Image: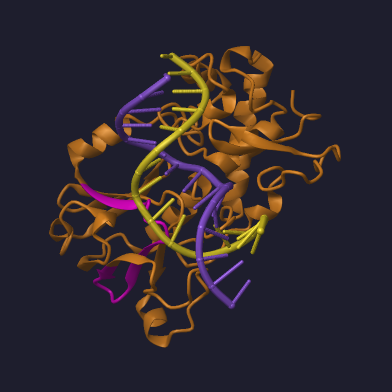
Chain colours: A orange, B yellow, C purple
Amino acid sequence: MPELPEVETIVRDLAKYLPHKTIKELKVLNKKTFLGSPKLATGKTIKQVSRRGKQIIIDLTNDRHLVIHLKMTGQLIWRSKKDLIIGGHPITGVGEELPNKFTRVIFKISDGSELFFNDIRKFGYIKLVSGSELEIIFARLGLEPLLNNFNDKKLKLVLASKPKSKIKSALLDQTKVVGIGNIYADESLWLAKILPSRTVASLKDSEWAALARAIVKILQSSISHRGTSFSNYRDAQGSSGNFIKKLKVYGRGGAKCLKCKNILSKSKLGGRGTVWCSHCQK
DNA sequence: CCTTATGCCTGAATGC
DNA sequence: TGCATTCAGGCATAAG
């Protein structure tokens, strides 16, 4: 499931290809995937591709913006004109050919390239919004953990409004801190040696420091490995991320802790599968 | 304020 | 083999 590192990887790639190019045609194959009128984006030029939390923002020349959320199984894969003609596409995990049966929206770009929005489960969406609507979306989102103003004091401060929440649930709250999903919540808490079930109010300052450091370290490390492909995440080229090899707890319930050999625990916390080491994490 | 359940979805994994 | 069931979970929303 695409979280901050996966979305960041896609955005960095798309930012190399898309700016200054024009959306020639927009094919919406699944109506519920595209919110708003596709006509308002057709013929418009892409100014910039960026990210806020887990959402991809594509700014258009008419002061409208495409807000793209991949949710669980969304993919945004770009194919150059050359790749489209020659074939021999990289394997996308949901079929080598694009479009495929999971393709929900196709952007035809002025240089002959195409951008495919694929989504097996149709949770994801592309929303066309105005500048003021975009501001409202941004206003609801929390701290960016990879901006330089992020630190343990800020983290403690924003989460202080939910003292009785379990720390893992609090980390998943996008109105407080953005970009952390189930994988990186578990990984960060393991690295910081904090039990997911601890309440926000129970954390000591030294633990806030460890947690903030762990979040930054894990997210940056994952970006450097082009994200985690646990199921069907793919980058903008259709390739898998490599961070799955670096995961310490996520997906490893019942296996041995890589630090102490204790058997990792697994259960549900706040409705999410949660894995932790009862020996390393306190 | 908090937690839990539900709905949106479909492929993969499991059970008989 | 095949059919039914369960699970995966981001996030909005409703309910307890």
Please state the horizontal and vertical placement of residue A206, each as a whole percent of the image. Answer: 68, 17
In the image, residue A60 sits, relative to residue A153, either above or below, namely below
Query: For residue A26, what is the image quadrant?
Result: bottom left
How many tags in the picture?
0
In the image, residue A198 sits, relative to residue A216, either above or below, namely above
State yes or no: residue A121 in magenta.
Answer: yes
Q: Nearer the viewer, residue A266 or A85?
A: A266
Farthest residue in the bottom direction?
A86
Q: Which residue is drawn at 26% across and 70% down?
A: A109
In the image, residue C16 sits, relative to residue A249, either above or below, namely above
A207 relative position to A121: left or right: right
A100 relative position to A260: left or right: left
Q: Which of A125 and A42 is in front in this view?
A: A125
Q: Which residue is drawn at 66% across and 13% down?
A: A204
Farthest residue in the right direction?
A261
Q: Which residue is drawn at 69% across and 26% down?
A: A194
Part of the protein shown in magenta: A107-128
Please state the horizontal and vertical placement of residue A245, each as a whole percent of the image. Answer: 70, 55
Please state the horizontal and vertical placement of residue A215, each as a whole percent of the image. Answer: 60, 34
Is there any visible trace of residue A115 in the rendered image? yes
In the image, residue A225 sits, relative to residue C2, either above or below, namely above
A190 relative position to A56: left or right: right
Query: For residue A270, what is the image quadrant?
Result: top right
Is there any visible trace of residue A233 in the rendered image? no
- Location of the C terminus of chain A by quadrant is top right
Please state the horizontal and vertical placement of residue A53, each as a whole percent of the image. Answer: 42, 40
Q: Residue at x 32, y 71 (%)?
A: A114
State yes or no: residue A179 in magenta.
Answer: no
